[in-house]
Amino acid sequence: MSAERVAASNREVESKGEHREHRMQESSASSLPLQQKIAQRPARNRFKRLLDLADSLLRETDSLARDHAFTEKSTRLQTLSFSEGIDFYDEVKRFETGLIRLALDHTRGHQAQAARLLRIKPTTLNSKIKLYGIEY
């Protein structure tokens, strides 16, 4: 056997040994508690994961706040006094302005996106904003 073949054979055996060792480390790492697994990750990855988690929590909080505001507005419809009578057009106006404000808040004032969210045409949204005097 030539020296080159012996060296190549030795490198192959070493790489197989390293591969086995790496697999053993992975299997022992999978049995570690979550805190130890996280601690073994590079700091940059942990920081990025933490930022992603914080961002998703903020988005969820915004969504819950919007849902809560919508729920409050819709429950007001249920508390109307029928004995006093209801002004249909005032209630429709109040409901529409609430929905339009929620959509504009959600889209940070972008009317075209708010119209898509409300599933109406942007020109209809714009005319209702002007009609009701909605400021955002």
Image (spheres, rainbow, N blue to C red):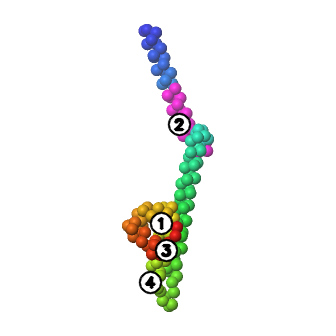
Name the residue that disc number 4 marks. 88
Type of residue at label 4? Phe
Name the residue that disc number 1 marks. 103
Q: Residue at x 53, y 36 (%)?
A: 27
Name the residue that disc number 2 marks. 27
Return the residue nearer the eye: 88 or 61: 88
Q: Secondary structure at mark 1?
A: helix
- Which of label 3 and label 1 is nearer to you? 3
Residue 84 vertical placement versus 2 (above, below): below
Gap between marks 3 and 1, in whole Å? Answer: 15 Å
Q: Is residue 43 magenta?
A: no
* In contact (CB < 8 Å): disc 2 and disc 4: no
Gap between marks 2 and 1, in whole Å? Answer: 49 Å
Gap between marks 2 and 4, in whole Å? Answer: 67 Å
Q: Which residues are magenta?
A: 18-36
Q: Which label belongs to residue 133?
A: 3
Residue 53 vertical placement versus 45 (above, below): below
Mark before the other along the chain sequence, 1 or 4: 4
- Graded by Cα atoms within 10 Å as few (under 14), some (14 to 19) or many (20 or more), the crowding at tag 4 reads few
Q: Position of residue 48 (x, y in %)?
A: 56, 45
Q: Position of residue 133 (x, y in %)?
A: 49, 74
Type of residue at label 3? Gly
Q: Secondary structure at mark 3?
A: loop
Return the residue nearer the eye: 58 or 17: 58
